[in-house]
Image (cartoon, rainbow, N blue to C red):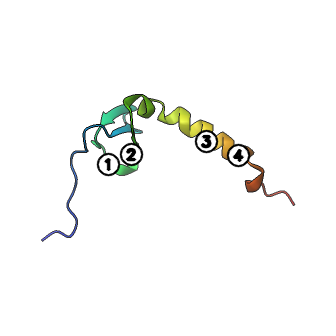
Amino acid sequence: MALFKRRTAGKPGEWYYCLKHGTVEEGPECRAADRMGPYVTRQDAAHAMETARERDEEWREDPRWKDEG
């Protein structure tokens, strides 16, 4: 008896961005290590990389994370 059941299909309305294929998926189709999400809308998933770049830049510029002595 398996302890963990493998979820092959996501719920309708869950959107993911696949890093491996560069595509938007409804429900997780690719493995977790290769995707970002879930997102509420297909449009949000389509802009996943842009959102990640913006957040990285905000964190890079955040004075609370600077190691200035």
Closer to the chain start, of discs 2 and 3, is 2
Name the residue: 79% across, 58% down: 67
The CA distance from mark 2 to mark 3 is 19 Å
Which residue is disc 2 drawn over?
A: 34
Closer to the chain start, of discs 1 and 4, is 1
Which residue is disc 3 drawn over?
A: 55
The CA distance from mark 1 to mark 4 is 29 Å
Do the residues under discs 2 and 1 have CB atoms within 8 angstroms? Answer: yes
Which residue is disc 4 drawn over?
A: 60
Q: Using the image as rendered, state which of residue 13 and residue 26 is in the foreground.
A: 13
Q: Percent position (x, y) of residue 11?
A: 25, 43
Total label count? 4
In the picture provided, is 4 more to the left or to the right than 35?
Answer: left
Question: In the image, which is nearer the foreground, mark 2 or mark 3?
Answer: 3
Which residue is disc 1 drawn over?
A: 31
Q: Using the image as rendered, state which of residue 1 and residue 20 is in the foreground.
A: 1
Question: In the image, which is nearer the foreground, mark 4 or mark 2?
Answer: 4
Q: Quadrant of the C terminus?
A: bottom right
Q: Amino acid at mark 4?
A: Arg
Mark 2 element type: helix
Q: Amino acid at mark 2?
A: Asp
Closer to the chain start, of discs 4 and 2, is 2
